[in-house]
Image (cartoon, rainbow, N blue to C red):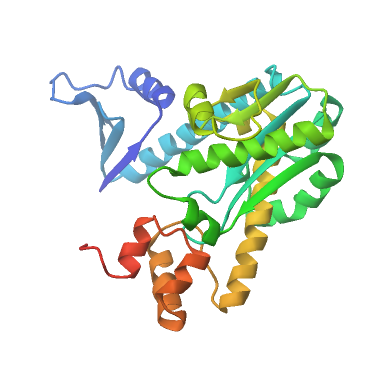
């Protein structure tokens, strides 16, 4: 029996130490070590993959899978602990995030939220985190509670508007930058919140972001651009959740209008549903429900050689 698994660097170090007295002497290209334990041969490759060969290969592999899973969970817990202890967590902040940019069907939704420091414990109790780490059911159940506590502004860019705007001078990041700027400026002007930070989940470098919005009438400045901001700041996390909630509701409306359930993402099932829409309503209907610049359009209309 052969079983191959991939392990983290932490588990890799544990395995090297565990098997140090059971190694074979021979050197093999691209192999960290080869060891024998009872009736199992263990081969660790430089790629991080580990192969177990023998009658008990599955038992040994499962043991290390379990250890590796524990290590991964500990790492996640530590990251969350570090994020909560960071200066961007326990503070008053405005943050923005978007949803729908990776989905062929449905709109783009951008939300900015204001989270005062005194509401941080309440949001922690709700289990607020990035919307990508929550189920749709969880988002639908907690968003109304969030909306009762915090101020927010959202913009929905429907598919017709998106397809009109997208082109040579307007790529996805420019469209996102313009929408982020609008909701942030609106929230700051209308609510005039007392804050420590304005945070945007970084999808473009600061100079590039401001270049994208240079022709906007109003420009919100003083922004902190942060990779994975939703993990470090509750305002961005709330913005992510509210955007996702709105996106899900809009997808339901489109599905009801078409009488066809619309899948999320941009995978093969999306192509199948796109073909069904074209067959039922004609290709022009895609302008109203889909982002035409995605490669899915070519596959759906059979204009690409695959």
| Residue 232 visible in rendering | no
Horizontal relation, residue 171 to residue 36: left or right: right
- Measuring from the top left, give residue 202's x and y in whole percent: 53, 30
User: Vertically, is 103 above or below 198?
Assistant: below
- Measuring from the top left, give residue 19's x and y in whole percent: 32, 22
Image quadrant in which you'd find residue 74: top right
Q: Residue at x 42, y 79 (%)?
A: 282
Specify the quadrant that holds the C terminus: bottom left
Q: Residue at x 68, y 28 (%)?
A: 233
Horizontal relation, residue 88 to residue 225: left or right: right
- Measuring from the top left, give residue 200's x and y in whole percent: 61, 30
Q: Which residue is more in the foreground, 58 or 80? A: 80
User: Vertically, is 44 above or below 288?
Assistant: above
Q: How many marks?
A: 0
Horizontal relation, residue 250 to residue 57: left or right: right
Q: Which residue is more in the foreground, 168 or 298? A: 168
- Measuring from the top left, give residue 56's x and y in whole percent: 32, 43
Q: Residue at x 68, y 39 (%)?
A: 183
| Residue 49 visible in rendering | yes
Horizontal relation, residue 195 to residue 139: left or right: right
């Amino acid at each position: 029996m052969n079983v191959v698994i991939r392990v983290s660097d932490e588990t890799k170090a544990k395995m090297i130490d565990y098997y140090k007295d059971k190694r074979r002497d021979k050197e093999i290209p691209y192999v960290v070590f080869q060891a024998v334990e009872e009736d199992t041969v263990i081969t660790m490759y430089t790629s991080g993959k580990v192969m177990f060969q023998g009658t008990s290969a599955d038992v040994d592999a499962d043991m290390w899978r379990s250890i590796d899973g524990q290590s991964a969970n500990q790492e996640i817990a530590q990251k969350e602990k570090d994020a909560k202890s960071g200066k961007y967590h326990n503070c008053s902040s405005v943050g923005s995030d978007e949803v729908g940019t990776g989905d062929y069907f449905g709109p783009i939704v951008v939300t900015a939220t204001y989270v005062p420091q005194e509401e941080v414990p309440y949001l922690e109790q709700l289990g607020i985190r990035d919307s990508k780490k929550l189920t749709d059911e969880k988002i639908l159940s907690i968003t109304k509670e969030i909306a009762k506590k915090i101020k927010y502004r959202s913009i929905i860019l429907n598919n017709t508007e998106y397809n009109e705007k997208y082109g040579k001078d307007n790529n996805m990041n420019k469209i996102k930058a313009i929408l982020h700027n609008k909701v942030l400026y609106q929230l700051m002007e209308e609510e005039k919140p007392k804050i420590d930070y304005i945070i945007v989940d970084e999808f473009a470098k600061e100079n590039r972001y401001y270049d994208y919005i240079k022709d906007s009438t109003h420009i919100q400045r003083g922004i902190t651009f942060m990779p994975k901001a939703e993990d470090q700041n509750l305002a961005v996390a709330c913005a992510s959740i509210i955007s996702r909630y709105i996106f899900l509701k809009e997808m339901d409306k489109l599905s009801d209008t078409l009488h066809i359930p619309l899948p999320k993402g941009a995978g093969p099932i999306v192509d199948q549903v796109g073909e069904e829409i074209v067959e039922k309503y004609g290709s022009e209907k895609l302008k109203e429900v889909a982002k035409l610049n995605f490669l899915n359009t070519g596959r759906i209309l059979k204009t690409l050689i695959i």
